[in-house]
Image (cartoon, grey):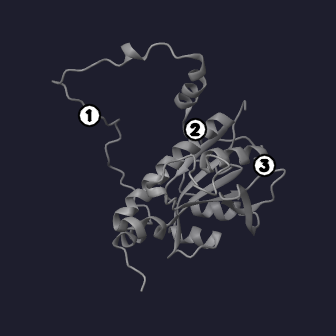
Amino acid sequence: MKKKYLALDYHKNSQKLDTISYFDKRMQYKIYPSAKSINLENYCGDIEFKEREFIKILLSRKSVRTWTDDGINLEKLSKLLRYSFGMRSNDFKNMGFRTYASAGGRYPIEVYVLILNSDDIEKGIYHYNVYNNSLEFIKKGDFRKEIYKLYNNQPFDINCSFVLFFSMVFERTMEKYGDRGYRFILLDAGHMSQNLYLVSEFLGLGIVEIGASKVSDEMIDKLIGLDSDIENIFLAFFSGKVENT
């Protein structure tokens, strides 16, 4: 008999977004005014030449909501997927460690790519096969209208060239850590998202993370062809080329 996790009840009950309009929109931070403090600016010093490119990318990272009409090409998408989510070395068949941290090495998140505009990649839905570092073509079609219906609650035009989706395969982590494993899956998503943002900045791609669609997540599962009780889309990234890249 398959184990029932309480965390999955929370997951299903939190699929729809309920935005609260009266929250405090000011920047939030905490200060201990009576504590002795050390000014870290005095110790940052000059950055060595070999560090400058990384620091530049780190400080330039931001969400982008406008893109050019240029499509994504296979070379750039390949680099984005490989260095954001791929194996750390060619010896992956023995260890399988990837470019991001994962609780217990369980890697419960799968990546799907929806191509909307490309000159050398056919439009449709692909799965990123991390084992072979390849794209698996699972559904052909131009799904821009479907994406617009799912995400037209967003305050920007969806004219990006591709969309990345993260899905949870719950059992991978929760069979080891139980209900607490749900927290670890979300932490994995944070590690992967930061990788994706930094690699995107390096490659000259603009990207924005979207945590909620207009409808239930299960509608996105249906579009891709997933069994929502086993694997569930919970995060999307809209991306494409930006000016001067």
Looking at this rendering, what residue extends furthest in the bottom direction?
1
Q: Which residue is mark 2?
A: 198
Q: Is residue 108 above or below residue 159?
A: below
Q: Are marks 2 and 3 in contact (CB under 8 Å)?
A: no
Q: Which comes before the other along the chain, label 1 or label 2?
A: 1
Q: Amino acid at mark 1?
A: Lys
Q: Residue at x 71, y 33 (%)?
A: 243
Q: Is residue 155 visible?
A: no
Q: Horizontal placement of 226 versus 204: left or right?
A: left
> In the rendered view, does 143 fall on the left or right side of 65?
right
- Residue indicated by mark 3: 74
Q: Picture quarter containing residue 197?
A: top right
Residue 203 horizontal/vertical position (percent): 68, 37
Residue 108: image location, x then y, percent:
51, 62
Residue shown at 30%/35% (left/top)? 29
Q: Which comes before the other along the chain, label 1 or label 3?
A: 1
Q: CA distance from mark 1 to mark 2?
A: 27 Å
| Element under disc 2 | helix
Q: List the residue tagged with mark 1.
A: 30
Q: Would you identify the image quadrant in which residue 198 lies?
A: top right
Depth check, mark 1 against mark 2: the one in front is: 2
Going by the numbered disc 2, the residue's amino acid type is: Leu
Quarter of image, res 150: bottom right
Local crowd size for mark 2, using a 10 Å CA cut-off: few (<14), some (14–19), many (≥20): many
- Can residue 63 be seen here? The reply is yes
Image quadrant holding the N terminus, namely bottom left
